[in-house]
Image: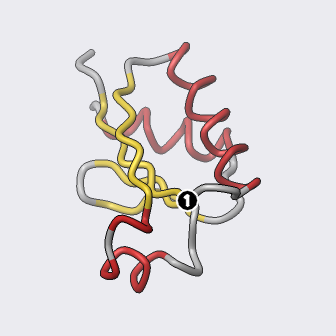
Amino acid sequence: MSPITITFYTKNHCPLCDKAHMILEELQEEMPLEIRKIDIYQSDELIEKYGLMIPVIAAEGEELQYGQINKEKLRKRLLTINK
């Protein structure tokens, strides 16, 4: 199974982002994930797009989850990507 590239939109001082990152790291122990962490404050466009949604987890050009991240739902969704 080749690694799934996850784009993780986040910002500093964000407890939900910290929790989401922990979930991604836990899932990374179960399946091959490459996590690309992007601070939305690097770009006005990203702030406008994701400012109220973060954290946002995307893969294969699709937003999988945002805000309160659910580990089980995310795991199931990631398993369908590599099939």
The C terminus is located in which quarter?
Answer: top left
Residue 78 vertical position relative to residue 38 in the rendered view, above or below: above
**Amino acid type for the residue under numbered disc 1:** Lys
Return the residue nearer the eye: 63 or 18.
Answer: 18
Residue 80 vertical position relative to residue 27 in the rendered view, above or below: below
Query: Where's residue 17, x and y in %?
Result: 64, 52
Q: Quadrant of residue 18?
A: top right
The N terminus is located in which quarter?
Answer: top left
Q: Which residue does the image show at 24% across and 50% down from the upper left?
A: 60
Q: Quadrant of residue 40?
A: bottom left
Which SS class for mark 1?
Answer: loop
User: How is the protein colored in the picture?
Assistant: secondary structure
Q: Which residue does the image show at 56% across and 34% down from the upper left?
A: 24
**In this rendering, position of residue 11 left or right of residue 31:** right
Q: Which residue does the image show at 76% across and 53% down from the upper left?
A: 15
Q: Quadrant of residue 34?
A: top left
* Label 1 packing within 10 angstroms: few (<14), some (14-19), many (20+): many
Residue 20 vertical position relative to residue 5 in the rendered view, above or below: below
Q: Which residue does the image show at 44% across and 49% down from the upper left?
A: 8
The residue singled out by tag 1 in the image is 11
